[in-house]
Image (cartoon, grey):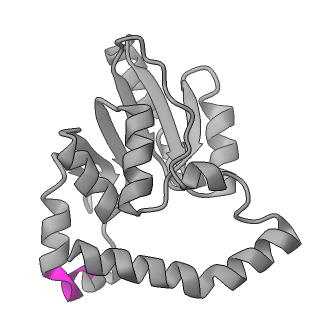
Amino acid sequence: MYLVYSLVLTLGFLVLLPRFLFDALRHGKYVAGFKQRMGGIPPVHSNGQGVIWLHCVSVGETQAARPLVESLQRQFPNHLLVVSTITVTGQALAKELFKTTATQVIYFPFDWGFTVRRALRRINPSLVLLMETELWPNFLRECERQRTPVAVVNGRISERSLRRYLLIRPFMAKVLESLDRAIMQGDS
């Protein structure tokens, strides 16, 4: 199943590559952080300290992570924090909000096994926290292989997402097995 997912991801990337190149040349879009997205993240020199990797997709998740980061600082003062985003706007906000608390603010790697493994080697997290419901199958699988605990925090699933997940239920069940915790939002 993971092979099919990776092939579809690669095919989608190749099909959209002309658009990415056009946007990159015309607007500078997708250029920022490309090396990091390929797993070329600066190594975290933890000096034996634990590292918490917090992934916030964009602006909304980054804003929502503020109280979590404050709590992590209080509860785990000897741990380093690495924050990742996917969007340029999320990256800018994370660099501003967490400039004194994060060791690094990086772009999240593309979800290919080799890019994810490379990023995980360079960060070597003790714990990964995913804001909301950012389920990247290869990333979760590699974390599980490396015995790195992963938790979804402030998770939510819309009706639309649920319908999509149900279409690929066996695969999603396997992906969800890689999570150690899921702290979800409720209706109330």
Up/down of 87 relative to 20, above or below: above
Q: Which residues are magenta?
A: 165-169
Could you say which quadrant of the image residue 128 lies in?
A: top left
Could you say which quadrant of the image residue 135 lies in?
A: bottom left
Up/down of 41 relative to 24, above or below: above
Q: Is 167 one of the magenta-colored residues?
A: yes
> How far across and how far down the image is residue 160, in percent?
34, 83
Residue drawn where x is 87% and y is 73% of the image: 26
Residue drawn where x is 48% and y is 32% of the image: 82
> How far across and how far down the image is residue 54, in percent?
42, 39
Is 43 on the left-hand or right-hand side of 144?
right
Up/down of 143 relative to 133, above or below: above
Is 139 on the left-hand or right-hand side of 23?
left
> How far across and how far down the image is residue 103, in percent?
54, 24
Is 30 on the left-hand or right-hand side of 59?
right
Q: Quadrant of the C terminus?
A: bottom left
Up/down of 155 relative to 17, above or below: above
Q: Can the viewer see residue 25?
A: yes
> How far across and how far down the image is residue 139, in percent?
33, 55
72 or 180: nearer the viewer: 180
175 or 75: nearer the viewer: 175
Is 34 on the left-hand or right-hand side of 187?
right
49 or 96: nearer the viewer: 49
64 or 1: nearer the viewer: 1
